[in-house]
Structures are given as structure tokens and as C-alpha cells.
Amino acid sequence: MKKLNIYDGIFPALLTPFDSNEQVNHIELKKMVNYLEKFPFRGFYVGGSTGEGMVMTYQERKEVFKTVIDNITNNTILPVAHIGAPSTLTAIDMGLYAKSLGYPIVSAVAPYYYPFKTKEIIDYYKTLSQKIGLPFIIYNYPGASNYSLNSDAVLELFEDTNFIGIKHTSYDLFSLSTFRQIKPYISIYNGFDEVLLGGLTMGASGGIGSTYNIIPNTIIEIFKNFQKGELEKASQLQKKACNIINVLIKHGVMPSEKYLLSKKDIFMGNCRHPFTKLSEIAKKELDQLDLY
């Protein structure tokens, strides 16, 4: 199996708790951090899609950055601040703030909404790297940004040693494999939890995902068994995870995950509008899941 570097491993993409008025609940966020840091995760991915960063103000995202890093007591955890924004200036501002708090790594999805050209996106990443000056994970999420990272862009961007990895949230595992072939020593994180094992077999050296919040042991064991070459055990655990994910998709992934994490005595609240609340029927079906 591939020898790990210091950035490789399993990172839960943190959810964000909200109170009944849809405001960030920092008390419960602290509790969530303290709960998750007890597991042997490599780090936390903060303020990304799972964290509802794109339905929060930039100031709220900064406040979440601060609460998370201020309450990590396990010094083996690497927190990653997701600073992606359509505006380069905004992303730089959030990145510099994360740096001032002590974040060791930043990450950003490609600028979204407008149909930016590839050169514009590459320039965006280069500018963020130059201005922020931290190790950087490129967040490749074609389904959200309408941009799909390709080999030419990887070769150009990774000439800059600040770029240390790619979060690959795509079912295109062929591209993931190609990234691994052309850049053997970078970190590549599988993004879709339902294909974690597939991503690992195609060259990923870790994963960043949302279900890691609610089935941490299953996800960690998939990774550990893969690293040991115990592929049958890893496959059985992946099937278990997929059965759970099928139910989450049916009712809404993040609302379902928040509900299930709330059963750990961490009040997560609902997702922020325009996400809808879970129905009672959905809750009953989620209650029947075996998360252990």
C-alpha cells in the first residue's frame, strides 16, 4: 500500500450546528469538535459544503473557523479552513484570517456561479496561494463549481509547492487515478463517501466526507483495512456505509446527518433555509439505521 505523508488520512467535513433561529450555535459546535476529536482522524475540514458554508455570511464562516480551532485539544488534528468564494478578494481575506488563527492548511472550491475560463480559475488559485502562503488543498467539485480539474491544470498548479493536495468530489475516478500518476507524492482525498474504497483503490491517500461525522468507526476501518491490504473487510464495510448513505440521500444528506448526530446529545438544529426540515417519517427511518 502507498506510504502515507503527513497530510494523508481521514478528515470529517464538519457540519455546522444552528439554533432555532438559524444562527450558528457555537456552544454545540464546541461539543461537536470535542466529540469528533476523540476518534483517530487526521484532521477536520471546516466550512465546506457539509458545513453549509455557501449559505452563511463570510463573517459567520470566520466565526466558525475560530470556534473550531479554539476548541481542538487533540494536537494531532490538522484543521483545514475552506475559504472558497466567487470573489478572489473575499477568499484571500478569509484565508489570511484563518492563517492568523493558526490554521495550517487552507482549501477552496473553484469560483462558482459565473462560467469562468480555465485560465481564470488557475489564476484564482495561484493568487490565493501567493497571498496566503499556506499549504493548500484544491477542492475539485465539478457538480458545484461547473469546473472539472484536469491534468494540465494539475501540472501547472502543482509547480507551486504550496499546493499539497486535491479534494476530489467526483465519481470520475479515472481522473483521480490520472492525478496520482502525474503527481505521485501529493495528497488526494476521495470526496464522495459512497465510493471511498473505490477512490482509495484508484490512488486516493485519504478521504474528506460528511458521513464521517456519524459513522466514524466504519469510515476509519475502511481506510485502515485498505492500508493493510484487507480488501474483503474493507469492501464489506463500504457496503455497510453505502446502505446508510442510500437512506441519507433519500431524505436529504445533511439534514439526516444533523438529526443523527443530535442523538449524540449534540444539538445540531436544522439546516439553514432553503433546506427543508426532516419529516417525522424520515426520522423514524433514520432511527432504524445501525450506525455501529
Image (tube, helix red, strand yellow):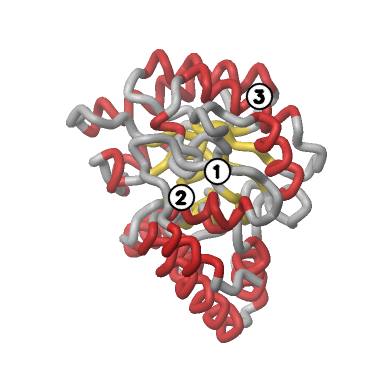
Contact? badges 1 and 2 (CB < 8 Å): yes
Query: Measured from the top left, where is residue 114 in percent x and y?
Result: 20, 27
Q: Residue at x 73, y 41 (%)?
A: 31
Q: Amino acid at mark 1?
A: Leu
- The foreground one among 258 and 103 is 258
Contact? badges 2 and 3 (CB < 8 Å): no
Q: Quadrant of residue 108?
A: top left
Q: Amino acid at mark 2?
A: Met
- What is the crowding at mark 2: few (fewer than 14 residues within 10 Å), some, or many (at least 20)? many
Q: Residue at x 31, y 45 (%)?
A: 149
- What is the crowding at mark 3: few (fewer than 14 residues within 10 Å), some, or many (at least 20)? some
Real-space CA distance between mark 2 and mark 3, rounded to the nearest whole angstrom: 22 Å
Q: Residue at x 77, y 45 (%)?
A: 76
Q: Residue furthest bottom?
A: 232
Name the residue tied to disc 1: 15
* Residue 131 seen in the current view: no
Query: Measured from the top left, where is residue 167 in percent x and y?
Result: 46, 47
Question: Horizontal placement of 9 versus 167: left or right?
Answer: right
Question: Horizontal placement of 130 versus 123: left or right?
Answer: right
Real-space CA distance between mark 3 and mark 1, rounded to the nearest whole angstrom: 15 Å
Label 2: element kind: helix
Which is more N-terminal, label 3 or label 2? 3
Which is more N-terminal, label 2 or label 1? 1
Name the residue tied to disc 3: 66
* Residue 103 seen in the current view: yes
Query: Measured from the top left, where is residue 43 in percent x and y?
Result: 66, 46
Q: Amino acid at mark 3?
A: Lys
Residue 14 to residue 209: above or below? above
Name the residue tied to disc 2: 254
Label 1: element kind: loop
